Amino acid sequence: MLHMPMIFGNGMVLQRQKEIAVWGTAEAGTEVTVTLSNAREEAAGEAGLQKIEEFSRETGFEKVEGSSEEAAVQNAEEASREVLLRKSELEAGRKRYGTGQAHTRADGQGVWRVTLPAGEAGRGLWMKVEAGREQLVYSDISIGEVWIAGGQSNMEYLLKYDADKELELARDANPDIRFFDYPEVSYEGQIEEFPEPDYGFWRQAEARQLPWFSAIGYYFARILYRKLDVPIGIVGCNWGGTPACAWQDTEGLRGTEGEAWLIDYAKATADLDMEAYWRKVKENLAQMKKTQNQVKQAEELEQIREVGQARETELDREAGQLEMAAVWERVMYPGLSRGEQLQMMQQMEKMTADTADKIDGEAAKIDMMKLQPQNRPGGLYQTMLQKVAPFTARGVIWYQGESDETHAEAYATVFGRMIADWRALWQEELPFLFVQLAPFGQWLGGTGVEYPELRKQQERVSQEVAHTWMASIGDAGMLDDIHPKHKRPVGERLAELALGHVYERPELCRVPGLCDAPEFERAERVPTTYSESTYQRREGIGESYPKETGIANTGQEEIRIYFRYGEGLHLETHGYTTAEPDIGYLRQEEQKQEKQKQEELGEWSVGQGQPKAQAVLVPALRLYQAVCGSDLQKSVPQKLQEGQLACERLSGEKAEIPVEEIQIQGNSLVLFGSFPEQVEICFAWEPYYEVNVYNAAGIPVKPFRIRV
């Protein structure tokens, strides 16, 4: 029986300028023909060709009465040339619009695959797949740019939860931006047992469908569409809370640091009754589907939110699955306070215990929170990714890492191997654009304590793995929520990286030629020549800007920190900027609220114990007296190891080194003061931090830790 993967469907977007992979299954040995056509262009071309051929038969290949043999031959030659010309024009049209035809035969297992010729952007195409007497026809197909959107919940995060959703939903529909979301599948056969009617088809960017787009994927697509003026397709293949090891071939982890994930899983399942485990997985899925159906019965989304708001002070009561689903709407947007999070965790524990009481036998003993099926190493690589690959695409956008804190020190190895596995599936070196983890304090019992290490590991990947680029979103994080609510800067900065590096069109970036985040390049110590300064203060902001006055050698030192991509280095006082011309972000009110939170929660206070002048000017910067060790070299990207080794702080030393003054000069930060022989400089090297140093493109400086 003829069958195609669900990613092939009406309204799909195919990749331009690359051969297009099409595959499926049919009865073994059956001849398969795949035709991709622009209906109007093809029909016009075929009709024209048919008329010319008829004319040829009438005037060229038959002797006209009264004409000479020589004239007949001449007519035939002219007609033949006309036929060849029309055929050439038709073939050129097919090539331009990516149309064409391919043939193959299903193998002994019924598997087949063909490639259609590469073409340019187009719209309104159809595809016909024929196998014997069977056929499948897909319509409303576009050819443009296709990107895979992978990762965990921050990539999955729907536009309906985004802080700017109302603005986006009010826009006119754009049928040239489309989104496909592969359903979350943790075992083979799950879709057959539990169908997913809300996933696995192509959506268009219009008010009814937009809420179900990945917010990051949408903002990414929106910028590409504006700059490239071609259809854009985003293919979502992601699952919240999943580690990178779930998305790769586990064989690549053996013998590496990443093998720790395989060891953990082996230990967790060593004495587990796997039949009981999978029985419980299916029971949980059945309950989840029941809850989803109940939620769908609500008249509209706002009604669901009202239920959640009404229950927010009653989470300690037995709310049931429906109410918890309603509360989850508030978890995603606008988020829960710490007190509300604590109540929710207590309710979830109670529900888990109640569910266990209703399950007999071994299944009741299984803690599904600690051993979720989607988190098993290699699982989603098999049940999701291999179902999408090798759908032809330009590249991958990726936001993940939060769930890898268990083995944070191995993330560069694990993520690097994962990228290699994805490229092997697609049989090409797909560009990977990924997001460095945002500032984060705590959420639902989890903390960002390992985030500095994870960010360092991400930086390593961006420096060591070819054709990877990393977006900095140090200004988009939240103290008490792992899900930043403003996804616009994330999607836009990924799009800027795509324009500058993948499409090699840096002139299309917001600031032409500048699409990367400022990153540490080098540092040096020199005797200071700056003796005194006066400060002008910007009312209501508290930023300090020095005016040069006396120039003299004071015997003190300067530490100059230079940044690559630091053109236009400056301080931003209002948060991130945007590439959208009709939006100006002034997040002062949001920052004021965050400051109030920090003051109420002293243990999370930013800049605590810091000299006032430094804390006000660059709050993410810290200086410590330090000692160096050669064993630390391996934790620093190779390009930073030329005399810039990370250091351990002196044992027991907690006091920070005061900085008398900080200036921005060109593409460098200049620190003035009296410094010890070894200084460790940390920028944004904490779970949660506030960054206010940007380049001209409005992109914040990436975290770094060095010794001078």
Image (tube, rainbow, N blue to C red):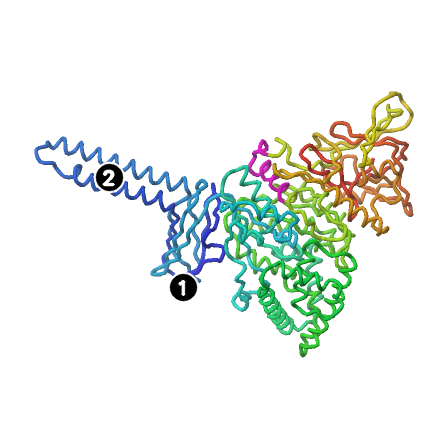
Foreground pick, 703 / 463 = 703
Judge the density around disc 2: few (<14), some (14-19), many (≥20) Cα neighbours within 10 Å: some
Verify whether residue 494 appears in magenta: yes
Residue 575, horizontal then vertical, whole percent: 72, 40
Prevailing SS of the magenta stretch: helix
Foreground pick, 352 / 94 = 352
- Check if mark 1's residue and mark 2's residue have beta carbons within 8 Å: no
Q: Quadrant of the N terminus?
A: bottom left
Q: Which amino acid type is shown beneath numbered disc 2?
A: Ile
Write down the residue under mark 2. Answer: 52
Q: Which residues are magenta?
A: 491-508
Numbered mark located on residue 453 in the image? none
Residue 436 placement, left or right of 559: left
Judge the density around disc 1: few (<14), some (14-19), many (≥20) Cα neighbours within 10 Å: few
Indicate which disc, 1 or 2, sits on the residue closer to the N terminus. 1
Residue 628, horizontal then vertical, whole percent: 84, 41
Write down the residue under mark 1. Answer: 1
Residue 469, horizontal then vertical, whole percent: 64, 41
Residue ID at (91%, 45%):
653
Residue ID at (87%, 26%):
533
